[in-house]
Image (tube, helix red, strand yellow):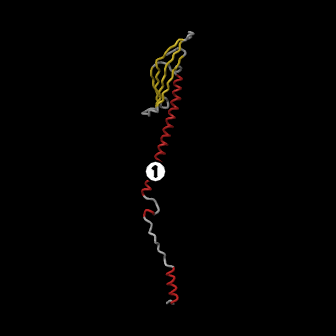
Amino acid sequence: MRSPLERSFLREARRVFRPVRSRTRPAPITARRGFALIEALAAFLILALVLGGLLQGVGLGARNESRGDFLLRAARQGRSQIEALGVETPLVAGETSGRYSDGLLWSLTIGACRTASDRAGLGETVACAVALTIRRPGDAAPGDRLTLQTVKIDASGTQR
């Protein structure tokens, strides 16, 4: 049993050290921590749009690199073929076509040739309009075609 002094001390201690009750309400559900489903969906949507744009840019870069490679190869081979006209290949009006060793297709059109006499009487000069079109095999895009046009002159006067 406790003495009256102990009982009064305990009563006073309970009154003084009584737990404090909060007068605020608990936080509503919307103010809790974390992400809502709509926020997570919006974040995934933004991420998908950014990645889609990035992949599209990479694809365009690869396509442009491929087209640049085609144009470089076609220009080199076409220039070589035009330079050989009248030297290794006869300069005759008409159309011919073929395939280079790397698979590119070519079509050569030589227009009507015009002859001009030399005033000194040393010979004739023959000039022919030449168009060389080079393209990729198959159903290539319209940009996958290169056309080189020039006038080829044969100063020897020997049109074959």
Give the residue number, with chain letter if any, for mark 1: 46
**Residue 95 lies in quadrant:** top left
Residue 73, percent across and down? 52, 31
Residue 75 image point, x, y percent: 52, 29
Question: Secondary structure beneath disc 1?
Answer: helix
Picture mark count: 1
Please state the horizontal and vertical placement of residue 65, each as a whole percent of the image: 51, 37
Question: In the displayed structure, would residue 79 be above or below residue 28?
Answer: above
At horizontal 46% and vertical 61% (from top left) the residue drawn is 34
Task: Please identify the residue farthest to the top as the structure is shown.
Answer: 121
Q: Does residue 117 lie above or below 129 as drawn?
A: above
Which residue is more in the foreground, 131 or 46? 46
- For the residue pair 30 and 59, the one nearer the viewer reads as 30
* 13 up-or-down from 122: above or below: below
Q: Amino acid at mark 1?
A: Ile
x then y, percent, for residue 110 = 47, 21
Placement of 8 over or under 68, stated as above or below: below
Decide: few, some or many residues near mark 1? Use Cα within 10 Å; few <14, some 14-19, many ≥20: few
Q: Residue at x 45, y 66 (%)?
A: 27
Q: Residue at x 42, y 56 (%)?
A: 38
Q: Residue at x 45, y 49 (%)?
A: 48
